[in-house]
Amino acid sequence: MEVPQQQLLDPRALLRAMFDAAVAAAQPSCHIGQYLPSKPAGRTIVIGAGKASASMARALELAWQGELTGLVVTRYGYAVPCEQITIVEAGHPVPDAAGQRAAQDIVQLVSGLNSDDLVICLMSGGASSLLALPLEPLSLEDKQRINRSLLESGATISEMNCVRRHLSAIKGGRLAALCHPARVVTLLISDVPGDSASDIGSGPTVADTSTCADALHIIRRYEVDVPEAALRLLESGAGETVKPGDPSITAATHHIIAAPQLALEAAAQVASAAGIRCHILGDQIEGEARDVGKVMAGIALQVAHRDQPFTAPCVLLSGGETTVSVKGNGRGGRNVEFLLSLGIALSGTPNVYAIACDTDGVDGQDDVAGAVLAPDTLARAWALNVSPRTSLDDNDGHGFFGALGDAVVCGPTLTNVNDFRAILVLQGIAHSNQEISHEARP
């Protein structure tokens, strides 16, 4: 008797292979050569920031024929060796003095350029924190306070970056203006829903259509803790960013070289090779992580019990960036919060597995990418006297999955195309008239 292929699968191995494929597809070395600008008559200066900026710099050095110099700033532990470009490490997700010094050095580096010069800017997720240059009279301590409050507020990444742009001396197109009249070409690895260039690293070299009034609205809506000096900057309009059509950025262009959709498609190919149909539900899903977990559980249960909207076996893929409004004493982490909420809603449904990881290798502030969920996850937690609901209420997804040994630790991936979520439904479950419980044991 022939054994069905899905019974031969190792669900955890398949999910991890899909995540690894997503990360591999977003490596700068795979794409940067396609977007090299023409050589200038003058100098070539390389600047940049982000979790992938060091690997982007290395890929650029290998692909570029000619001299260049520059500086990029990346997260601690994410540096890679370069020969011509200086790599600096700094704090993320909360900015630190090293990031401020790097930003000041970059400003000095692009000062006094002329129209014969070329600036190549390498930007990826994380640059908002790593490239920290507060708009006067704000201090670094003010920026740290604002950033912490934004991270815990539940605001979307687009909303957080709107506030950051208007309180920075370097973001919201200001860095491109400082490079004027040199030509500026920005190469971007997107980690934001919708791939909006002004949101990637808060858009230091990209014109901004949002306003100080928009930033004020976000601060008031989410009750973000900001100093009085920040409010005065926004209320007076002194924090306004560089707008489209401004003469100082007419020589600035940008290209997105890697994005979440590309990573999801690479993962889908791995599932397809294993004989499993894959359905991409979206690459820009936002919202509270626990709410998204409930919604995804509802879709997975519909597949498992009713073969709608897809027939099992299949994989449900999604990307984007959810948020966590931290109310408890846990460390947050949007991927583990999503996964814990998903698990509670699935309530041990057989044949349903999932993985949720940040493609940069860091979920929240922990050096853990995410975790894996299996049908026996809740049962194993109860056996260890670990309560799923209490862990979720305390925003302690990292503690929960760490106790089970189900955390995914991969180290720095040197890229960042946001969250990766895959739900594997291996087999449909015959529908009964009994009510399907979505509740986990207390």
Image (cartoon, grey):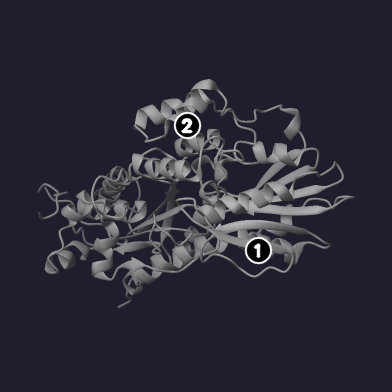
The amino acid on which the numbered mark 1 sits, given as a three-letter code, is Ser
> Which circle, 2 or 1, is nearer the viewer?
2
Residue that carries the numbered disc 2 in the rendered image: 230
Name the foreground residue: 72 vs 250.
Answer: 72
Q: Is residue 118 above or below residue 403?
A: above
Q: Does 139 sit left or right of 223 as displayed? A: right
Name the foreground residue: 333 vs 425.
Answer: 333
> Which x, y percent locates residue 112?
80, 43
Q: Is residue 351 visible?
A: no
Kind of element beneath mark 1: helix
Q: Is residue 173 above or below residue 95?
A: above
Name the residue located 78 percent from the left edge and 50 percent from the top edge. 37
Residue that carries the numbered disc 1 in the rendered image: 29
> Which x, y percent locates residue 341?
25, 51
> Which x, y percent locates residue 356?
37, 57
Name the residue located 26 percent from the left edge and 62 percent from the top edge. 399
